[in-house]
Image: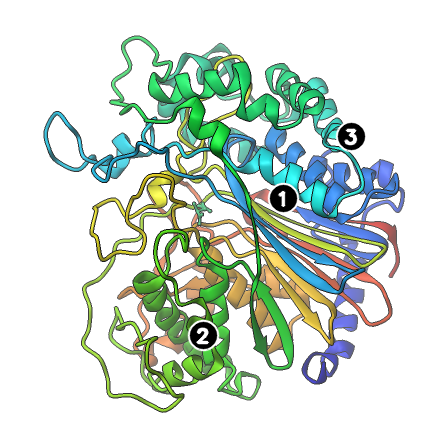
Amino acid sequence: MRYVRRRLAAVTAALAVSVLNGTATSPAFADQRGTDKTSSATGYGGAVSTVDPEASAAAIEVLHDGGNAADAAVAAAATLGVTEPYSAGIGGGGYFVFYDAKRGRVGTIDGRETAPAVMPHDAFTDPATGQPYRFTPELVTSGVSVGVPGTPATWERALDRWGTVSLHDALEPAIDVATRGFEVDETFRQQTLDNKLRFEAFTSTSRLFLPGGDAPAVGSVLQNHDLAETYRLLAKQGTRGFYRGPLAAEIAATVQAPPKTPGTTLPVPVGHMTTADLAAYRVLDQAPAPVDYRGLDVYGMAPSSSGGTTVGEALNILDTFNLSEMSAPGALHHYLEASALAFADRGKYVGDPAFVEVPTAALTDPRFGKERSCQIDPLHAAEKPVAPGEVSSYDGVCPAAAATPADEKDTEDLSTTNLTVADKWGNVAEYTLTIEQTGGSGIVVPGRGFLLNNELTDFSTVYDPADPNRIEPGKRPRSSMSPTIILEDGKPFLALGSPGGSTIITTVLQTILNRVDLGMSISEAIAAPRASQRNTAQVAAEPEFITAYGSQLAPYGHELTPAGDAFTSAAEIGAATAIEFMPDGRMVAAAEPVRRGGGSAMVLKRSQ
Ligand code: GLU
């Protein structure tokens, strides 16, 4: 409390400016439906931030009708399955973090995809050549990378555990959007074009997303009757309708024999998933991985995601420095270095705890963070990659420098979606969900209206028995998703998360630092340009970050390089959503003003 309250005057002033600048929408929630995008909204009674106005409107509708944050989060997620089908949907997985106001506790659901029971260690080796498949095009567009989806089971579990409405009711707004259709925007068209070659490779996918052989035009309306029908099936039968019966059989058949367009040149390795894998899928209720950062309690997702331990470790490292008294480049230097150290430990220690021993307690222990902080030279960037720390013996005292390990290739892609919802009772839902790459595996289950994930590409692609993230049957691949809820004196202060593969971790971390240490409002903290140091020689950064800080960070030895990859046309990092809870009871919903075409923040009752 001590720390954050001091900054409130500045925050309030900044928010007043953003509202006056016209980022506000009409107070009536009904008017918020449609394509009117606003990146900041302040008010009472409930709030939501997502990447999409239809999804935010669905959440507001549920809150307005008396539903709580869990209900509204599921409604928003299902709607994102319609309007953001390349980022998330029932063919994927995710992590759901919830602050239960009545119990004053944070709980989490691990809805990560699992590897099929018969997936061999050499699943990513081409049997024809004995050589590893290439990541692109073989692995990303394949049946072999499809994990057993966790998203439908996550929705059902979140509603059972914390919700007040049935899955049937929570799916209603999404069914409505899928039926009447949504307006295609620039981002959707561009994402379709980026995937055109892959989507053309499957009869089911091209039929749905390339009507007339082309990406839908900007401004056209895209309906998805197949998905509406699939949601109706779930509404009627619950998730049994997904994990068992005809739909389960169709999913397994699609993975084992993807519906390839005759003549396609893409190789499309087949997968191993069976109906038994679908029937056996379970989400996990998990304790969160909390750390204390400057008197705030930060609750992140424990493994199988590396999000909670990596954000948490970096915060523990940074807690030993007074960032708010440093120059901006000085604070950013410490941020980049702390992130590299935490990524080194992520790589060495984090995998699915059902299969490998993960030292979660050590990684989130402030004494371990203190010891790791010794590696940071206040004036010089360490040579990357930095070595991992020793979790079996640490005492908070500086150890001797360790040997430099080999550079690790990071193959995670930049997709996924995140949403934040709060209700009038004080409950908060923070939910990151994905189908991995933008467009997932590229394979739509024929006639069912949704894409299958390619999440198993998050396993290390080369099998090494010492690697915690090696392929094992039934295992969850390591994730970077970092849905985070921060409490102050036991009450919500901030909830946030982001998509972006392994840059999720740095986006969440940098946004927390921007808000807590660098005096920004939450909207400013999200809008600020980003850089991502994941223990590599160069720091990936947005062009605006390079312009603002490149020359100031060069004397420290940081080499900045434009972000972006082979799959996406934008040099952006992350697409965060957040809600901040003000001491006077107001909620500030914040979304991206620009990235991914801008997000959508809404509140039930708007105030200044
Ligand atoms: N597969 C990634 C993860 O679990 C998320 C996908 C992305 O954001 O690119 O960390």
Q: What residue is shown at x 36% (from left), y 63% (from top)?
A: 346
Residue 69 in the image: x percent, y percent?
Answer: 76, 48
Q: Quadrant for residue 401, please give it.
A: bottom left
- Is the Cβ of the residue at disc 3 closer than 8 Å to that at disc 1? no
Q: What residue is shown at x 51% (from left), y 86% (from top)?
A: 326
Q: Disc 3 designates what residue? A: 169
User: What is the three-letter code of the residue carrying label 2?
Assistant: Tyr
User: What is the three-letter code of the residue carrying label 3?
Assistant: Asp
Quadrant housing the C terminus: bottom right
Vertical order, 211 against 395 (above or below)? above
Vertical order, 240 against 536 (above or below)? above
Asked which secondary structure carries label 2, the reply is: helix
Q: Which mark is residue 51?
A: 1
Q: Disc 2 designates what residue? A: 335
Q: What residue is shown at x 44% (from left), y 40% (from top)?
A: 436
* 430 lies left or right of 604: left
Asked which secondary structure carries label 1, the reply is: loop
User: What is the three-letter code of the residue carrying label 1?
Assistant: Val
Q: Which mark is residue 161?
A: none
Looking at this view, name the residue that lies furthest to the left: 129
